Amino acid sequence: MLRKEDDHITGSVDWIILIIYLLLIVAGWLSIYGASYDYEHETSLFDLSGRAGKQLMWMGFSLSVGFVLLKLESSIYDIFAYMIYAFFMLLLAVTIVVAPDIKGSRSWLVITDSIRLQPAEFAKFAVALALARFLNRYNFRLLTLKNLVIITSIVVLPMLLIVLQKETGSALVYVAFVLVLYREGLPGMVLFTGLCAVVLFIFGLKYSDIEMGTLTLGECIAVLFVVIVTAILIINFRKDYKTAFIILGGAALLGGISYLMDFLNVEIDWGIIAIIGISALIVYLLVMAVKEWSKTYLLFAVFAVFSMAYVSSINYVFTDVLQPHQQIRIKVSLGMEDDLMGAGYNVNQSKIAIGSGGVMGKGFLNGTQTKLKYVPEQDTDFIFCTVGEEQGFVGSVLVLIGFSVLILRLFFLAERQKSTFSRVYGYSVASIFLFHMTINVGMVIGLLPVIGIPLPFFSYGGSSILAFTILLFIFLRLDMARKRR
């Protein structure tokens, strides 16, 4: 039985979240109108034939759906979590077969000429529900092989189906669930390993064309990175300052002698030096593992071996696995190429638009870059450049503050939940919003590769605003029921 405050929306819903949501969707609506405004064919803000008018209809529909979700019994989300997940996985699979090819991907189900739905957007809340249901089991233990395999399958299955639709960007969003698992007991080393993988990928690829003898400069930098990280890990986990000093000192000595020989015009193969260094590190760690009878040193040695194997495979993955358009986007983001009229055109024009806005912006509907349509996809993936040009630095910061308050509030609400199901779902919602905001803004300002994911509540699209509304309002309903007897 529900308490009185759980029955009435006005008395139990989190108004901070709701108000921020309303402010963001209105700001997004105005931004879409500004991005799609055409001086030659002026349309009203409420003209249902224009982009802003269509977005307004989706806003109204999304709010209606959100209200219905708040009125439903909260237990149905737990009860039907697996069924919802199975339905959307089936829908993703069907989409691969029946969806038409639109801009190189098969991710849109065409309902009518004016209505198209993207199942990948809705699958996010389905995965969040399934994950919350699975982790909510009695006496659940995360760190067992069986549970890790099932959890990985729940998250990876939609990623694979979305990749088959040729929507790599949408698939990458599901990486956000790693933060949820970290809250539920996943070791921090997993996140740390992921961060190391990103750093090694950047260095290994960016400097892959510079030969240093047997190895490339990227591989040599990777060796130095692994040596330094290993020493830090030894200090952090073993408090063994002596071993860390020997590792760093040995690396410095080897590098110093090699540099001196090179200075004296002795031909040096820096690749061989790097190989000697990493080999010595691995052997030393194995010796310490036997001497101290410690699995920790053995794990450090495994980390070093797999890191170098990973770095050696980067070129193969980049060249033979990634698509050409993905390769060029990454190269442009890393500064390896300046394709300003090709893959780098969008980002370059976006940065020009944002920079031209200055501190206070040019004013609503006064942006020149966006009005002259210099920025492709300026009302969808690159909507943030419209905010930057028209509202300037101040307006951009206010938007980012709005998202930050929303995300922090979601984390706060998730942490105060009394059930594992609600807590896991809440962390999933917050993590998804955090990922979308970070990646979208990062790619618009040129800090991250362009992978084509929307900015929540701002990017034009019915599927996007409806899916994010459902994702958010389900959690609001679960939070309303936290005081259930």
Image (cartoon, grey):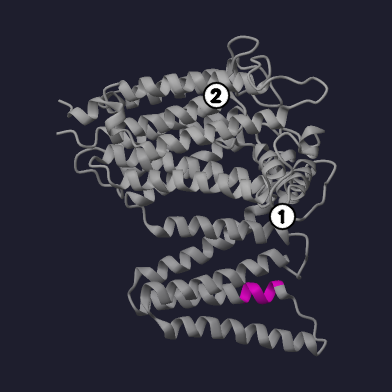
**Is 100 on the left-hand or right-hand side of 185?**
right
Secondary structure state at the residue bearing disc 1: loop
- Indicate which disc, 1 or 2, sits on the residue closer to the N terminus: 1
**Is 25 on the left-hand or right-hand side of 265?**
left
Give amino acid for label 1.
Leu
Residue sitting at x 48%, y 78%: 284
Residue in front for this viewpoint, 31 or 83: 31
- Dominant SS in magenta: helix
Residue assigned mark 1 = 334
Give amino acid for label 2.
Ser
Rendering coords of residue 386 (x, y %): 69, 39
Residue sitting at x 51%, y 70%: 229
Residue sitting at x 62%, y 56%: 201
Rendering coords of residue 368 (x, y %): 80, 38
Instruction: Check residue 14 for magenta coloring.
Output: no
The image quadrant that residue 250 belongs to is: bottom right
Q: Quadrant of the N terminus?
A: top left
**Is 21 on the left-hand or right-hand side of 462?**
left
Tell which residue pokes out farthest to the right in this image: 341
Rendering coords of residue 351 (x, y %): 74, 48
Q: Quadrant of the C terminus?
A: top left
The image quadrant that residue 335 belongs to is: bottom right
Residue assigned mark 2 = 463
Q: Which residues are magenta?
A: 271-276
Secondary structure state at the residue bearing disc 2: helix
